[in-house]
Image: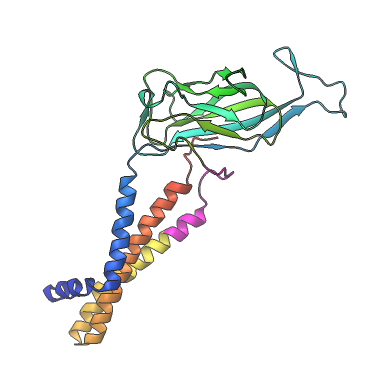
Amino acid sequence: MKQLLQAILKYAKHPITLCALTICVALLLFWLSRSRADPVFVATNPELVAEQTDEAPKLTLYWEGKETKNVVSVKISLWNRGRLYIDSKAISSTDPIAIIPSEDIRILSSITVRTSRKSLRFKTPIIRASSTNQRDKILVEMEGDEALEKGDGATLRILYEGSEDCTFTVIGRIKGCPRGFRKLRYKKAKNSSSALYVIGTFASIIPVAFGVYMLLWLAPHSRKTEDRTGLTLAILVGTVFLVLGILMLVLYVGLLLTLTYPSWIF
């Protein structure tokens, strides 16, 4: 066993092995360095709820006593995907969290339809267009002495009058997050497909299992039969596959964190 460990240490110094280890350590350190807040948001595609058309001339839409040409619905989910929490003190009072449209629309209502926790509540007042505010916008304010822990957030449903091509952006300064809220691509399937889990799991387990097999069975067998070439090959290949499997596992975990949405959104 002592000779096997010495042989492993010897061939672990091979340039290929060192290169793989360097990449693995670098990715691991990068993943650990992401211990910060990470505010993100995602918006559904706008859906037409109702509209006045020539096909129904007697149909008239009103909202709060004012005639409305159409009503369009969109849902926006925002949350903290990072490891550090975001409390109310981290949100700038001069540049608060707000949802702004890409076009000149009339926002009819904004309600919070779901939150990650029952105790987490938000106010979503509508700020009308003015001389200092070119378009309607929605402020997003946490109620009470709360904070957004990892995975915490809310889903808002917005009704507005205007184009169905309108998009929405979440802005606002979060201290410690210079990029602010990052927009993620909307996917109807909120979570990654089962195929991703299967492929990722096998891509991680197979190299590790093969590396362990080479090091713990084939290498000792080659040593017993005094097959030096086989021993060298078993140790070298086994070490490389073991490191490769660990590297794939790190990448797989990072990919899951990137693609998977919280279960509560939408």
Rendering coords of residue 173 (x, y %): 44, 29
Q: Is residue 249 above or below residue 171?
A: below
Please state if 178 lies on the left or on the right of 190 as rendered: left
Q: Provide the residue span drawn in magenta.
A: 184-200
> Closest to the observer: 180 or 4?
180
For this orientation, the residue located farthest to the top is: 65
Rendering coords of residue 142 (x, y %): 44, 22
Q: Residue at x 27, y 72 (%)?
A: 15
Q: Residue at x 41, y 55 (%)?
A: 252
Residue 199: in magenta span: yes
> Closest to the observer: 68 or 217?
68
Q: Which image quarter is the C terminus in?
A: top right
Which quadrant holds residue 108?
A: top right
Residue 41: in magenta span: no
Please state if 12 lies on the left or on the right of 88 as rendered: left
Rendering coords of residue 101 (x, y %): 61, 30
Q: Residue at x 77, y 27 (%)?
A: 51
Please state if 263 lies on the left or on the right of 209 as rendered: right
State how the image is colored.
rainbow
Q: Is residue 208 above or below residue 72?
A: below
Rendering coords of residue 141 (x, y %): 47, 21
Please state if 263 lies on the left or on the right of 29 as rendered: right
Q: Is residue 44 above or below residue 224?
A: above
Q: Which image quarter is the N terminus in?
A: bottom left
- How many numbered circles are shown? 0
For this orientation, the residue located farthest to the front is: 131
Q: Residue at x 32, y 41 (%)?
A: 35
